[in-house]
Every structure is written in structure tokens, then in C-alpha cells.
Image: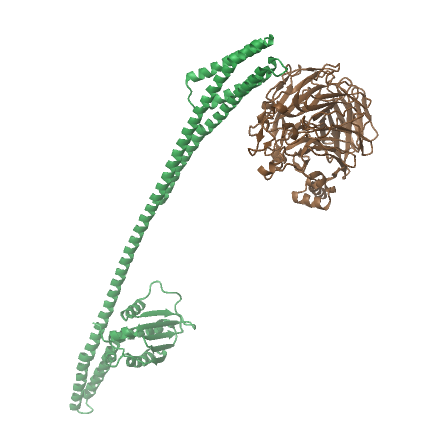
Chain colours: A green, B brown
Amino acid sequence: MITLAAVVAYSWYITIQIAGLRNLQNNLTDRSRRDSLQLLRIQNDLNSLAVAMRDMLDNDEPYPLTAWSAQFQRIRSDLDDALRLEEQLAVTSRTQEQKEYLASSLAQFWDAAERIFALASDGKDKDARDRIRLSLQARQAALSTAVARLLVQNNEREEQAALQVAQIYDRVERQVYLFFTATLVAILLTSLYLIRSNRRLFTQLASLSNLRSELAQQLISTQESTLRYISRELHDEFGQILTAIGSMLGRSEKHVPEGSPLRAELHEIRDIAQTTLDNVRSLSQALHPVMLDEAGLESTIDWYLPVVEKQTGIVISYEKSGAAFPMNGSAAIYTYRILQEALNNVARHAGVQQAWIRLRFLPDTLEMEVEDHGKGFAAPPSKPGIGLVAMRERAQLLGGSIELLRPPDGGTLVRLKVPREKAESNAREEPQ
Amino acid sequence: MKRRFFLQSLAGFASFPAPGVSEILAGVSPQSPALGFRLADVTSAAGIQFKHNSGAYGGKLLPETLGSGCAFLDYDADGWLDVLLINGRDWPGHKRMRSTLRLYRNNRNGTFTDVTRPAGLDIEMYGMGVAVGDYNNDGFPDILVTCIGQNHLFKNTGKGRFIDVTRASGLAGRSAFSTSALWLDYDRDGFLDLFVCNYVKWSPERDVFCSLDGKHKSYCTPEAYRGETCWLFHNRGDGTFEDVTAKCGIFDSSSKSLGVTLLDDDQDDWPDLLVANDTQPNKLYRNQRNGTFKDVAVEAGIAFSTEGKARAGMGVDVADFDNSGSFGVAITNFDNEMIGLYRSTGRGNFEDVAVPAGVGLISRNTLGFGCVFFDADLDGALDLAVANGHIDETVRNIRGNVGYAQPPQLFLNNGKGVFHNVADALGAEFAHAKVGRGLAYGDFDRDGDLDLLLTTNNGPAFLFRNDQLAGNRSIRFRLVGTKSNRDAIGSLVRIYSGALVQSRIVKTGSSYLSQSELPLTFGLGKRDMVERVVIQWPSGRTEEYKGLAAGRTYECLEGKGITPQDGF
């Protein structure tokens, strides 16, 4: 905007300068030149008169002096025309004295010429020639000098005008350089400002992103530790209590005679306790499989997949390859959670009853794929669900990446890649 | 494409071939029938063996490079055009040969016989130009030869001989550097008066040393010399002349005149004069109808070039080249100055249309001398022929693109005021480079078209016979004055043939140092009839004739009617 304004202002300035220059050239230079041309024409006429007078004095023509009368008249006619034009064009401020001198000199010249031709008409050629020699030639010379002076003045004026024009050109040139410098500085400052602003924005964005990531990771960690705690409590506390209740009810049942209603009620209570115990254990396992901590990811998956098949009716083809490396601790739980979420999505959104799980232990990477040939994504979700966000955050916590792809046969392919180094280091950490 | 348009296109192509095409045509056939005519060099066949003697011996005297002229005239009044070639001579102290002008009588069979001696013209003089006119109205043309020194007036006795009447006529006792001249009846008293151009005040004693390289002498430009007034001699009617130069207003000691032509600039039926000056403004002397003239060249726009510069005018001719009824002017100039082609804009003013008319740019590298308007192809539009040649044989050392010998030019008029040089298409005979000077036209073989006579400086003369190939027709008028001067000089003839209206003026002089025939030739294309002819005689009488058949010459006797001849 600033640059645009500068260009507009500068264009206006240049237009004014050029108009001024044109005006000056038109009014001074061109006019002065045309004036000089008219002065040269006058000078030429005066020279023609001088040549004619020389011819008249040479007396080598078989004609009387009156023969030159027509020639004088022609020159006078042209001279008058040239003087009239010159007066219109004259830019040099002539003094009144100069004007009067020129007018009176011309009048005197023509007056003398007429008198000379009158003498010649009377046959007094000798007297006429004497007058030419004594008077007319001197008057012509004086006129010629006066016109030459005017020409010099005009030339000086032209030089001044040329100087003025040159100064204007210099000024314009200076202004052009100034404008270019100012424009460059403005562009430089604007660029610097923009770079700095962008950098600040990027920093803020990065900071916010880190905060959000930290928050998400903190949330996941908290969630995991909470679920683990609850799972443990359920397993250890409520499981023990319910086991104790079951044992106690078994013993009490033995003290009641067979066939009595009480024995039957105690047995029923013991079954309920056992069922509750099983449920508690299942819940505990679902919240945080103890197996992860005890047997690692591979075994947990081996256990988990039949459970999912049983719960959802989805037939899962599980394929495992590569030399396994230890995956437990936080690495295991995060990987397990991603698998859980991916299969949960298959069950809830894919609309198919078959899925493929591939676990590849590559030399530097653990790669896990969950693929279905269901509905897939119509388009990348503009606002991803919490499940997807959680998967991505967990992958980041693992130092890996997660991709959502479309397999050639349609559906969805979720691919998790975790660097081995990260997987192993995470394996030594426990989620807080 | 309609057939008519197609045929017109073909005709246009034939008339104005592009440069490349014309070269091809010239290569295939020396003189292409596509032009509708050819100019055959018949000089040798006609028995004309002439070589101009400039007298050049190395002294580089100014007149050497400027001569000389030629004329078509019928000196024996037998109806067949004879040829007059002006010659120079050796300078005093450098005598090598005897050289005189040459008069060739027409044998009426395409050949000529040199009759210089029996005609009494075997006189040595440094001749420059020629003007032919019957100043004593005896029916036989008299000859004025302009010279370096004393001019000569030869009276025709009517018996095949001429008598030098310079002294008897009152023209003796004048020494000058005379160039072109013409006869006119400026006061319309029935007797031809004489106008003579003078160049500069020069004589061998006054010769100035000029040099291009600072070592060797070269021909001076006219700036090195003082001007010289033209002369006007009034014919008293008794065989003598009175010098009226001073009292008629013609006197101008600054003039450096080379060409002169007659015209009626303001169409008041009084003859005016146009003088081409070298490095000085051209002069247009308008007849004031009271025995005086007034120079109006500046007001008329013909004194200077469009840039306001006085050019080096050489030859000049006037004609109604655009068939507008107003007469235009052609003035040949120095190289780098272009031909001046002036079209009349009415009210006696002129406009230089050389560039838009197509003769300007092409003539920038030529130095033109003789120039004549004539209808080469008889299509009803006047064409322009120009003789070119430089004055300095070393010019190519200074200006590489300008040569000493230069091809003549023939500008064909397309009828719309645009000209195209077809010299190349006419073949090498015409187009080869020459140091051209004089140029005149005339129908020497009486076939109804106009042949050309061209002279060169210190070289041969050329007679080009015009042969029509397209079947175009013409009509010719030979005017004889009774109350007017017998040659009817100054008469205006206008013919009407359908939409075609053409005007010609009977005049002497024109071109450069030369004179064309006096009879008027009108090209008619394929027309075979002229509906109307109007003749304005110098006496003021106007005559009108109707229904004239093409293909013949008509003799018009002022006040007595018109008589068709058998053929031309």
C-alpha cells in the first residue's frame, strides 16, 4: 500500500516536472529557435542587400541602377515579413532603445534607398552610387550588426533555457534515484516486518502445538495411570474380597444341611459372587490388561484378538513377522490402545466382519497395520474425532507416526510406525 | 473475383511492376510488352553520330560539366521533325579539334542527314542550350543558341539555311554564362519575346580554384561565384529586340538560373515564367499584364524545398499531370535533394508532393537535369522522364552510392497522381548509366507517339524511338497563330474524351537547355474519339471543335478552323 502510494505520488510528481519541461521547451527553446531562424532570415536579406549594393557599385551590368529596384522591393517584402514574424516570436525582452533603434535604422535605410533610386531615376547614377557608398552600405552594416547582436542575445537566451532544461533533467534524475532508494528501503522494511511477524506467529503456533501435545500426552498418561490404578484396585481389592466372600460362602454352605433352602440360597449367593468376581476381573483386564505388564505386547495381542472376535463377531486375520523385540511398559500400552481404537473403529464404522492385523518387527521399526475393507473415509475428516486424535497423540508419545490410508480394495488401513529405539526406551518407562 | 477487377489488376501490374518483377521482365525481354510501349535506341540506325565536346582538358572550368542541350524542330517545315544537338568547343589555348552544333534533317524514313554545313550552322561556339521559335512569324522556326560568351540567334531563311542575326537583332554585345532559354509572347502582341537564363558571373579569367581533396582542382559549386540576372528581350516586331530586363522587374543579380518554363500560374491567360535556380530560391515571375512581372515564388510555395532550403534547381517542366485542369511543376535538383514535384493547390499556390507521388525518395541519389512530362504509353496520364548524371566524375569516391553516370528515369503515371520508375523494365538501352543533361520529346517518325532525344556531357546523344505495343491511340494538334504569334506559344488546349479531360500548353524551353516539339500530343488509351476540343489562343480568342477522330494530327489555324491530316 505504501509502495503503491509512493508510485502514485512519484508519477504525479514526474508528470508535473515533464509538463513543466515541455512548457519551458515550447515557450523558450523552440520559440527561441524559431526566432533565431527568423533573425537568420533577416540577416540573409540584409546580406542580399549588401550583395546587391556591391553589384550596383561594380557597375559591370549594362543596366541602370533602377534595375535593382525590383530586387530591393522583393528583399524588402521578405524582410518585412521576417521582421513581423520575429517580433511575434521574440522571447528576449528587448529594451525600448533596441526596438526603436532597429525600427528607425530600417526606416532610415529604406528612406535612403528610395532617395538613391529617385536619384537614379533622374539619371544621376553617379550621385546615387556615391550615396550607396557613403550612406546605404553603412546603414546596412549597422542593421546587420544590430541583428547579429539580437542573434547573440537569442543564442544566450537559448543557452540559458538549455541550462534550465538541463537543471530540470538533473532534478528529475535526482528525484528518480531518491524515489528508487525510498522504494527499496520501504520494500526492505516491509519485508523485514513481515518476516519477523511470521516468525513470531510460527513460534506461537509451535508453542501452542507443543502445549496442546503436552496436555494431550499428560491427559493420556493420566488416563492410563488412572485406568491402571482402577484396574489394579478392582483386581487386587475387589477380586480378593469377592474371592474371600466366595470361599466363606463355600465354607458356610458346607455347614448347612443338604437340601435345606438356606444351602440353596448360599449357593446362589456364591454363584453371584463368582459372577461378580469374573466381571470385576474382566473389567480390570479391559481397563488395563495386567498381561501387558507381565507378558508384554505380543502375548496381550494374542489374548486380546480372540476376545474382540468373540465380542464383536469380526473375523480377524492376524499376521506377525520379524524378530520380536521387547515391547512393554508405556510403549506396549500405547500400541495396545492404538490397536484397541483401530479395531473399535472397524467394529463401529467399517460395516464389515473381517479385519487384518499385521505386526512387523523390522530391524529399526515396529510396524503395525489394522486393515479393513469397509466403508473407509469419504474424505479426510475436517475435524477428526477424539479417537483419531488420541491415536495420533499416542503415536507421537512413542516418537512414531500414524497414517490413515485407503487400501487398493477400499476401506481403511491404519499404519503405526514406531522406531525401535523409541519403542525400547518407552518400554522401560511406566506411564505415570 | 469479378472479371473487370481481375483485368484491372492485371493492367495495374503490367503498368507498375514491382522492382523485382521489372528486373525479371528486363532480363527476359529487353523491352517488355507488359509496359505497353518500348523505347528503342535508334541513334546509330538513324545516322546520328554525335559526340559532345565539353572542351575539358583538365582545367576543370565550370561550363565543361553542364552542357549541353538538344531540340526537336521542323526547320524545313516539311512536317517531319529534325534534330538539333548543341555542342561545346575547345577552350582557347587548348585547341584539339573543331566542334560545332549539329543539325540533322529527317529523311522521313527513320534516318537523318547531317545538314549542319549547308544550313549555315557550322560555326564554332561554346553552346549550352537552345530555344526554337518563329520570332519573325514567317513560318520557319528560328534558333537561339545560348552560349558561354555571346549567344547566337539564327534566323531561318526558309530555304534550308540560317543566318546569324545576333548583331542585327540587337542581342550582340553581351557576354554571359547563358543556359536555358525560351520564347514567349509576354505582352501578347503577336511576336515572340525571348527569355534567357544566366547562371553565374563566370569567365575563364574569373575561374575560381575549388578542390575536394585540397590538392586537385574540381568543379566549383555555384556558391563560389556571383549570380547573374536572367534577361528578357522584347520583340519589337521588326526583327530587333529590346532588353526589358530592368524595366519589367525580372532583373535579379542574385539569380543562378539553369532552367525556365512557361506557364499560366494564375490562369489569367497571360504567360508567367518559372525559373529554376541553383542554390538560390526559384523564381515565379507572374505577369502583371502591363509589361512587368512580379516574383511570387515564395508566396506560391515553390521558391524553396519543404524544409525552407533553396535547392540546386536544374531542369523544369510544367504540365497538368493529374488532369485536374491546373498545371503542376517538376524541378530536377542536386543529388540528396530529390526531384521537386509540385501540384497546384489552386489560387496560384503549389505543394511539393514528390514523396507521396513516388518520385521523391527514388531520386535522392540522382542528380537530375533534363525533365519532360509526356505521355509515354498514351494512356491519358502524363508521365515524367528525367535525364540524370553527376557533375563530378570523382563523386563515387566521396558518396559511394552516387555515381557520375546515372541511369535516366521514366516515371509512369498511374492516372491517380502516383508515379513508378520503369526505366529498368525498358531495358538496358534506355536504363544504362549516362551522364545525362538535355532531354526533349517529339514524334520524329510520325506514328503518333512521342520519342525521346537525350544528350550527355562530353558523350553521345541518344535517340529513343517510342513503339506502342498495347494499341493505345493518340490525337495531335499543330497550332498556327494568325493574330497570335505564329507558333501559338502560350496557347492552352483542353480535350474532353468521356471522363478524361486533358490540358496542354504550347511552350518552348522547359527541361534543361533543350526544347521539345511544339505540336501537342494527347494519349487516349483505347478511345477512338475526342468529344470536344477547346483552344485558348494567346490573342484571347477561344475556339471549340467537336467530334474529332483519334489517330491523326489536326492543324489548327487561328480563326480559320481545324484541318485533319492524313495520319500523323
- Between B203 and B132, the residue placed more toward the observer is B203
Seen in the picture, residue B563 relative to A61 is either above or below; the reply is: below
User: What is the tally of numbered marks visible in this picture?
Assistant: 0
Judged from this view, the residue extending furthest toward the right is B566
The N terminus of chain B, quarter of image: top right
Which quadrant of the figure has residue B175? top right
Q: Position of residue B426 (x, y in %)?
A: 71, 40
**Is residue B456 in view?**
yes
Seen in the picture, residue B412 relative to A349 is either above or below; the reply is: above
Q: Position of residue B467 (x, y in %)?
A: 77, 37
Left or right: residue A204 compared with residue A81: left
Left or right: residue A65 compared with residue B3: left
Left or right: residue A29 compared with residue B97: left
Q: Residue at x 42, y 16 (%)?
A: A96
Judged from this view, the residue extending furthest toward the bottom is A258
- Between B475 and B371, the residue placed more toward the observer is B371
**Is residue A1 in view?**
no
Seen in the picture, residue A335 relative to B438 is either above or below; the reply is: below
Q: Residue at x 84, y 30 (%)?
A: B566
Q: Position of residue B365 (x, y in %)?
A: 61, 36
- Between A276 and A82, the residue placed more toward the observer is A82
The C terminus of chain B, quarter of image: top right
Seen in the picture, residue A414 relative to B152 is either above or below; the reply is: below
- Between A76 and B550, the residue placed more toward the observer is A76
Left or right: residue A227 compared with residue A119: left
Q: Position of residue A20 (x, y in %)?
A: 41, 32
Which quadrant of the figure has residue A346? bottom left
